[in-house]
Image (cartoon, grey):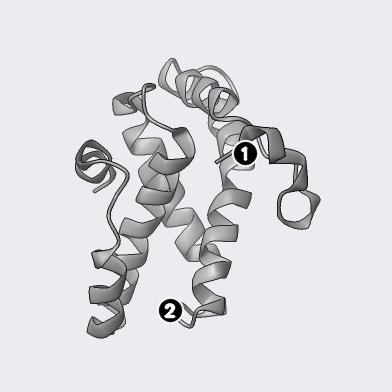
């Protein structure tokens, strides 16, 4: 993703750069006061945009958006200590979101969509293993 276009994001959101997101993750790791809330405020719009796309594609239901975002953020928070700053922060976040989407599709019993979603490669095997 081109960080130079961050002001032209969906709905006029001022997207943080990968470096800024990485710093927020590092702040969570060192348990800086308010870091979790700051990270959630920064990544929730990215996760919401991903899941809204899944709703538009017919792979998720609108009434489950908030739950999907919250569940993905819980994984982000849990895995923040193992985040590899050499990776793209956004790719890591989206891979986690995809894992949660596959879990969601499995929970509603939509095996055809699980197969389609699982066929799209992850940014790296490291991300996949750390995201799960």
In the rendered image, is residue 109 in sight? no
Q: Quadrant of the N terminus?
A: top right
- Whole-Å distance between the Cαs marked 1 and 2? 24 Å
CB of mark 1 within 8 Å of CB of mark 2?
A: no
Q: Is residue 15 left or right of residue 116?
A: right
In the rendered image, is residue 30 in sight? yes
Relative height, residue 103 to residue 108 (above, below) = above
Relative height, residue 106 to residue 131 (above, below) = below
Mark 1 packing: few (<14 Cα in 10 Å), some, or many (20+)?
A: some
**Label 1 residue SS:** helix
Q: Residue at x 48, y 64 (%)?
A: 67
What is the quadrant of residue 38 in the picture? top right
Q: Position of residue 27 (x, y in %)?
A: 51, 19
Along the viewing direction, whichever of 132 and 84 lies nearer the viewer: 84
Q: Position of residue 2 (x, y in %)?
A: 60, 37
Nearest-to-viewer mark from 1 and 2: 2
Mark 2 packing: few (<14 Cα in 10 Å), some, or many (20+)?
A: many
Q: Residue at x 68, y 39 (%)?
A: 15
Relative height, residue 7 to residue 107 (above, below) = above
Q: Indicate which disc, 1 or 2, sits on the residue closer to the N terminus.
A: 1
Q: Which residue is mark 1?
A: 42
**Label 2 residue SS:** loop
Q: Residue at x 36, y 49 (%)?
A: 96
**Count of numbered circles on the image:** 2
Q: Which residue is mark 2?
A: 59
Q: Is residue 88 left or right of residue 19?
A: left
Q: Position of residue 100 (x, y in %)?
A: 34, 60
Q: Is residue 85 left or right of residue 57?
A: left
User: What's the mark number on residue 116?
Assistant: none
């Amino acid at each position: 993703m081109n960080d130079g276009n961050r002001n032209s994001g969906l709905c006029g959101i001022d997207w943080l750069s990968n470096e800024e997101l990485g710093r927020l993750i590092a702040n969570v790791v060192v348990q800086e006061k308010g870091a979790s809330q700051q990270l959630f405020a920064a990544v929730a719009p990215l996760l919401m945009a991903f899941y809204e796309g899944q709703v538009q594609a017919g792979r998720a239901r609108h009434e489950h958006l908030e739950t999907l975002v919250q569940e993905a953020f819980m994984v982000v928070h849990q895995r923040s200590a193992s985040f590899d700053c050499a990776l793209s922060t956004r790719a890591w976040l989206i891979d986690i979101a995809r894992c949660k989407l596959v879990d969601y599709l499995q929970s509603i019993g939509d095996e055809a969509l699980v197969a389609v979603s699982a066929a799209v490669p992850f940014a790296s095997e490291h991300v996949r293993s750390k995201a799960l």
